[in-house]
Amino acid sequence: MIQEGKNAPDFTLDADDGTQVTLSALRGKPVVLFFFPKADTPG
């Protein structure tokens, strides 16, 4: 689990346009990570 105030581990995700984005490639740029539970699901 990621702790508040700690650096996030490097990861790669698919962007809306199909390209891949790696967190380490954004180093030095402002980044906002937003996590939310799946819509309309319990928990």
Image: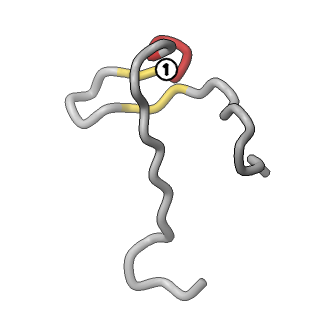
Across the whole image, how many numbered discs are drawn on residues? 1
Q: In the shown orientation, is residue 15 left or right of residue 3?
A: left
**Which quarter of the rendering shows the C terminus?**
bottom right
Foreground pick, 3 / 41: 3
Q: Mark 1 highlights which residue?
A: 22
Residue 34, image x and y in percent? Answer: 45, 52
Tell me if residue 36 comes above or below residue 31 in the rendering: below
Tell me if residue 32 comes above or below residue 12 in the rendering: below
Residue 23, image x and y in percent? Answer: 52, 23
Secondary structure beneath dot 1 equals: strand
Q: In the shown orientation, is residue 18 left or right of residue 27?
A: left
Q: Residue at x 45, y 71 (%)?
A: 38
Foreground pick, 14 / 1: 1
Tell me if residue 34 comes above or below residue 19 in the rendering: below
Q: Residue at x 43, y 40 (%)?
A: 32
Direction left: furthest residue: 17
Residue 27, image x and y in percent? Answer: 51, 14
Foreground pick, 39 / 26: 26
Residue 31, image x and y in percent? Answer: 42, 31
Amino acid on which disc 1 is placed: Thr
Q: Residues within 10 Å of mark 1 (few under 14, many from 20)?
A: few
When asked about the image quadrant of residue 24, the answer is top right
Check the image and tell me how it is coloured: secondary structure
Q: Residue at x 52, y 26 (%)?
A: 12
Q: Residue at x 47, y 65 (%)?
A: 36
